[in-house]
Image: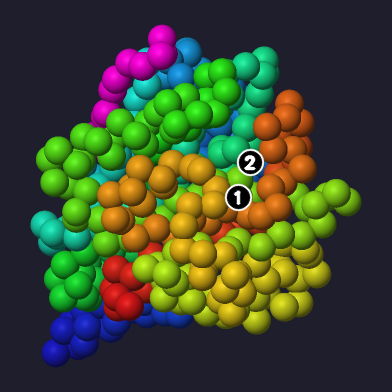
Amino acid sequence: MRTMILQIWALISVVAKFVNADYSEYHNKHMSQQLSLSNNSTSNLLLPFDTTRVPGSPESLYIQDFIINHYKRQMKQNWTIELDNFQENGYNYTNMIFTLDPTNSEKYIVFAAHYDTIVNIDGFIGAVDSAASCSILLYLSQFLDTVSFEDRYLLDKKWDSNEMGIKIIFFDGEEAIHEWTETDSIYGSRHLSEKWMKTGEISQIELFILLDLIGGKRTEKVPNWKIKSYYKSSHKYYQELSHIEDKYLNENNNTNTVAHEKELFPTDVLYLMLNKVLIEDDHVPFYNANVSILHLIPFPFPETWHTINDSFETLDINEIHRWSTILCNFAMKLLSDGL
């Protein structure tokens, strides 16, 4: 009897460890090492992106290997890996799609960002555009992998009821080669959306969440920004994300940094009422295919946008930690409880 009680208590301890309101124990243990501007360890998910990533270049291939190996070697569960390789406009592109689907779901939540950098600015690193967003997706993936593995029984039951899986997409070729046009931009997302239109996979996307330009420092020229709600079909998700942001800010109200100011405003409905594409980005082909879109991009854009100054020195690690925490909690809300 004593042995059985100890086993039950051990199970309860695992559940209590991970199934709580904010998963703070996990973040306290992992975030400062995995998302760091100074800790140059093998666990760092941010610093490897401190390089140019022009499509088809050796640096791009290095980053592809880094991302793929993260899912192959660091995960506890079996993630499906899909590489979408193609050529266009003289460049070789590779989209990378990673799927966690413990219940063979018919619907998916997609989190996406682009990993390429501008071609025509020599030495352009793209720290905000969009290395930081990619590192957040890697952190989010490992969080979901660990939490669902440690508490597989409880979460699988919830995932069963929602029949929802997760896809993480790293797009190549978001940036234009010469000048932004409909045919010289978003190469990766255009190619993948067309592919999934043919296979029918695009209809399985419940919500497409795109991160871009996340993680920069405020400056005198751009002292603050908002992340707007643009589409009526996804506004309920935006509202839930705002609730999670409020909770995060309340719990961190003793932190006196600008990275702890509110950025989501559900009652600011000017752009929402227009209900159309106002900022062209990787979500556009999916929006045109009637996918529900949540576009997480600050406006106005960071001051370093599309300049050689978009370097790791202009990143705000508190901003990166903030969005990593919020999006982890948001993902758990979507996958375990639904909306």
Residue 112 percent location from the top left of the image: 41, 47
Mark 2–mark 1 Cα distance, whole angstroms, equals 6 Å
- Residue 114 drawn above or below residue 210: above
Q: Could you say which is closer to the camera, residue 162 or residue 271?
A: 271
**Residue situated furthest front in the rendering:** 274
Residue 117 percent location from the top left of the image: 56, 27
- Bounds of the magenta span? 81-91
Place residue 305 in its image quadrant: top right
Taking the image as shown, residue 110 lies to the left or right of residue 277, namely: left
Magenta includes 289?
no
Q: Residue at x 22, y 83 (%)?
A: 8
Query: In which quadrant of the rendered image does the C terminus lie?
Result: bottom left
> Which residue is labeled 1 in the image?
214
Number of numbered discs overlaid on the protein picture: 2
Magenta includes 85?
yes
Q: Is residue 140 visible?
A: no
Q: Could you say which is closer to the camera, residue 223 or residue 132?
A: 223
Examine the residues drawn in magenta and state their main secondary structure. Answer: strand
> Which residue is labeled 2 in the image?
128
- Residue 287 drawn above or below residue 189: below
Disc on the earlier residue, 2 or 1: 2
Q: Residue at x 65, y 67 (%)?
A: 263
Q: Amino acid at mark 2?
A: Val
Look at the numbered discs 2 and 1 and tell me whether their residues touch, using CB distance below 8 Å: yes
Which type of secondary structure does the marked residue at label 1 adopt?
Answer: loop
